[in-house]
Image (spheres, coloured by chain):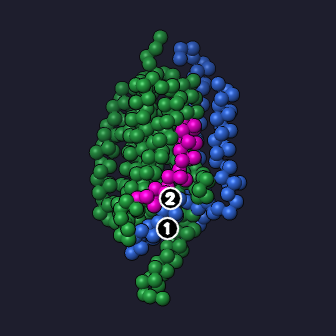
Chain colours: A green, B blue
């Protein structure tokens, strides 16, 4: 056995010990320590303008319509619930959904970045899931990139006069899926020492995407159900947020 | 309306549990576990340089049962808020005419 081979085996067994048990139940956030320092800081800085915009947007919305605090709490709680449920998928591994689609549709993508950040901090500190060093990258994929895609699809569908439920479904599903694609790209950018960046990206995508497809569909359906519930019981709030037209 | 809701919930449950029965040998580990294996493959020299803060404080692994407890707490907090708000909405609709 050459020295390199021994090293690899030592490293893998160390990793198996470290991650084998704890993150067996974990899912997709980039794990603590798995991005080099520069990337951690870079992604973190990239998030700042979105978080600032989100903070201001939430402030403004709440100032205009105090009653929206209930809907906001609900969108946040939705992310909390959805991202804690780890679901078995067709590829034989588990992953969890993001739950950011609902908030993106109701409050716009930048507001969701704040909600997502809260969840990610909670998970990083208490659940050893994701991590404090990788929080910038995770915030970017789950709380910024995903919601922006959701919101974009939602706006396009609205313009194209597509059925509202279909639009909600598409927005939530594709936003969820996109989150994982971004994660794959982030991982590939940091880790491609032994191969090209494209090959690495393909490999990471293959790990994340097929697992996520059924879950993304589930998330789409759940989001539609919640929106249906809100349309029945929370008409005043949906009107003040502009989700329903100021009818009557 | 009611029927479609029930059908949709059934679809969700089926989608979540069919893989469990269809793939009997699979481990159903986390996909980030698979992620770290890919890191190993494409960047074998890389060594994670930080460990989760909670595990550092514990000086070791977070026991699996405790982790599932913490995840349950997260779910519980979320469901609590949703149920509380939704309950208020439902009652409001019942007692007020204009909405």
Foreground residue among B46 and A69: B46
Residue assigned mark 1: B37
Image coords of residue A51 (percent x, y): 33, 44
Instruction: Farthest residue to the top: give it.
Output: A248
Q: At 38% across and 71% down in the image, what residue appears?
A: A194
Neighbor class of circle 2 (other Cα within 10 Å; few <14, some 14-19, many 20+) is: many
The numbered disc on residue A201 is none
Establish if A148 lies above or below A184. above
Foreground residue among A106 and A114: A106
Image coords of residue A243 (percent x, y): 45, 25
* Residue B72 visible from this viewpoint: no
The answer to the question of whether label 1 and label 2 lie on touching residues, with beta carbons closer than 8 A, is yes
Q: At 43% across and 32% down in the image, what residue appears?
A: A154
**Residue B12 among those drawn in magenta:** no
Image coords of residue B3 (percent x, y): 69, 28
Image quadrant assignment for residue A68: top left
């Amino acid at each position: 056995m050459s020295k390199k081979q021994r090293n690899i085996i030592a490293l893998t067994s160390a990793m198996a010990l470290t991650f084998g048990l704890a993150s067996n139940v974990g899912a997709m956030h980039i794990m603590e320590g798995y991005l080099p320092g520069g990337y951690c800081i870079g992604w973190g800085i990239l998030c700042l303008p979105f978080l600032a915009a989100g903070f201001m947007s939430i402030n403004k919305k709440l100032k205009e319509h105090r009653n929206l605090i209930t809907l906001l709490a609900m969108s946040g709680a939705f992310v909390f619930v959805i991202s804690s449920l780890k679901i078995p998928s067709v590829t034989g591994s588990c992953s969890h959904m993001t739950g950011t689609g609902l908030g993106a549709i109701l409050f716009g993508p930048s507001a969701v970045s704040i909600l997502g950040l809260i969840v990610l901090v909670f998970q990083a500190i208490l659940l050893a899931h994701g991590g404090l060093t990788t929080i910038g990258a995770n915030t970017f994929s789950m709380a910024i990139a995903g919601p922006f895609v959701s919101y974009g699809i939602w706006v396009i569908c609205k313009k194209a006069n597509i059925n509202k439920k279909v639009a909600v479904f598409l927005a939530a599903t594709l936003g969820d899926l996109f989150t994982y694609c971004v994660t794959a790209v982030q991982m590939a950018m940091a880790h491609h020492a032994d191969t090209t960046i494209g090959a690495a990206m393909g490999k990471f995508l293959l790990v994340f995407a097929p697992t996520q497809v059924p879950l993304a569909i589930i998330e789409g359906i759940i989001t539609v159900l919640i929106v249906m519930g809100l349309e029945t019981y929370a008409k005043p709030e949906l009107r003040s947020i502009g989700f329903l037209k100021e009818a009557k | 309306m009611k029927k479609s809701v029930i059908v949709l919930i059934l679809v969700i449950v089926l989608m979540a549990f069919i893989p469990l029965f269809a793939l009997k040998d699979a481990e159903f580990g986390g996909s980030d576990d698979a992620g770290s294996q890919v890191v190993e493959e494409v960047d074998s020299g890389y060594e994670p340089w930080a460990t989760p803060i909670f595990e550092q404080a514990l000086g070791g692994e977070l026991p699996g049962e405790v982790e599932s407890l913490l995840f349950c707490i997260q779910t519980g907090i979320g469901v609590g808020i949703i149920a509380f708000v939704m309950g208020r909405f439902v009652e409001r609709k019942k007692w007020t005419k204009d909405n």
